[in-house]
Image (tube, rainbow, N blue to C red):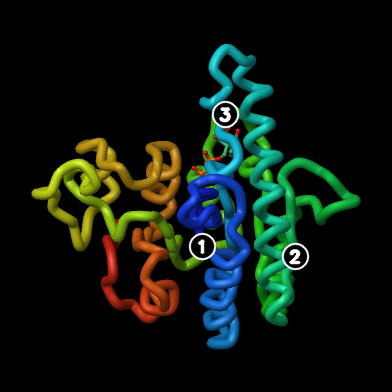
């Protein structure tokens, strides 16, 4: 299960969708598919809208806007994957039958077996959750072997490496350490789900080309949480 933040699609401008970047990510995903790896993907929406940006808005409505924004990203990723010949299906947690399939676990697993990349859109379908939690949930449901958590930073640090030059990167961590120390990896509901279901999380940077393949090959290119 590959978790991509919305920002991963934004490129350097930090907002919207950079199709060059989407294509680069798609090529990396294609390498996995060509190796015979079954790939599911959950994509966020930070490049368009996050519920907490809603300010004075009703939180539930703001979160629905966020979930809809993940669908925009999912379609963009689907489009760039199909441009390079990768078969895909988008399955949404909120039904929109004219655009994509509804999320049906067994059908998703069948697509994966057939070598199609399944992009899980609209998060978990519930407000007050994040796409990190949706990735952990879907990973558990489809019995994923690991979550590849692609970020802007190349792993989990003891403090923000963008602010502190002496920040130290962890090579490995336990779920408990992340939870207890409040480290900035996945959010805590996602971490708790992974812990309860023993799903390892590999945190790494997307900025280095070839990293998705390296992560799959077992190279420790970031931080492994298990
Ligand atoms: N969201 C939600 N429920 C979910 C997943 C996402 O309500 O199960 C909403 C929430 O408002 C969130 C937004 O969708 O802020 C975008 O997701 P996220 O912030 O996880 O995106 P990322 O940070 O990965 O780009």
Residue at the (29%, 48%) spot, across then down: 175
User: Residue 81 lies in what quarter of the image?
Assistant: bottom right
Q: Which of marks 1 and 2 precedes in the sequence?
A: 1
**Drawn side of residue 51 relative to residue 181, left or right:** right
Label 2 SS:
strand
Comparing labels 3 and 1, the label whose residue is closer to the camera = 3
Comparing labels 3 and 2, the label whose residue is closer to the camera = 3
Residue at the (70%, 48%) spot, across then down: 71
Q: Distance from label 3 to label 1 (Cα)?
A: 22 Å
Residue position for label 3: 51
Residue at the (52%, 26%) spot, across then down: 52
If the image is split into quadrants, where does the C terminus sit? bottom left
Depth check: 45 or 145 in front?
45
Residue reaching furthest bottom?
Answer: 35
Residue position for label 2: 89
Residue reaching furthest right?
Answer: 98
Q: Position of residue 75 (x, y in %)?
A: 73, 57
Mark 2 nearby-residue class (10 Å; few <14, some 14–19, many ≥20): many
Residue 205 position (above or below residue 122): below
Label 1 SS:
strand
Q: Please report contact status of discs 2 and 1: CB closer than 8 Å, yes or no.
A: no
């Amino acid at each position: 299960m590959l978790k991509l933040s919305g920002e991963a699609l934004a490129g350097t401008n930090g907002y919207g969708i950079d199709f060059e970047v989407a294509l680069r990510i798609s090529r990396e995903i294609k390498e996995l598919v060509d190796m015979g790896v079954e790939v599911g993907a959950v994509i966020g929406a930070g490049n368009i809208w996050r519920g907490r940006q809603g300010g004075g808005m009703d939180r539930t409505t703001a979160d629905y806007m966020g979930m809809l924004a993940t669908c925009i990203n999912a379609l963009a990723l689907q489009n760039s994957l199909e441009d390079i010949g990768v078969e895909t299906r988008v399955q949404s947690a909120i039904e929109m039958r004219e655009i994509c399939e509804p999320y049906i676990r067994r059908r998703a697993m069948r697509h994966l077996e057939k070598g199609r990349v399944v992009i899980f859109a609209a998060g978990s379908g519930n407000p007050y959750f994040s796409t990190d939690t949706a990735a952990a949930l879907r990973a558990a449901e489809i019995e994923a072997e690991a979550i590849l958590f692609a970020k802007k930073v190349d792993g989990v640090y003891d403090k923000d490496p963008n602010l502190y030059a002496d920040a130290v990167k962890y090579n490995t961590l336990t779920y408990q350490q992340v939870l207890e120390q409040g480290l900035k990896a996945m959010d805590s509901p996602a971490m708790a789900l992974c812990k309860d279901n023993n799903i390892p999380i590999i945190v790494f940077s997307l900025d280095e080309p070839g990293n998705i393949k390296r992560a799959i090959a077992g190279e420790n290119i970031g931080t492994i949480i298990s």
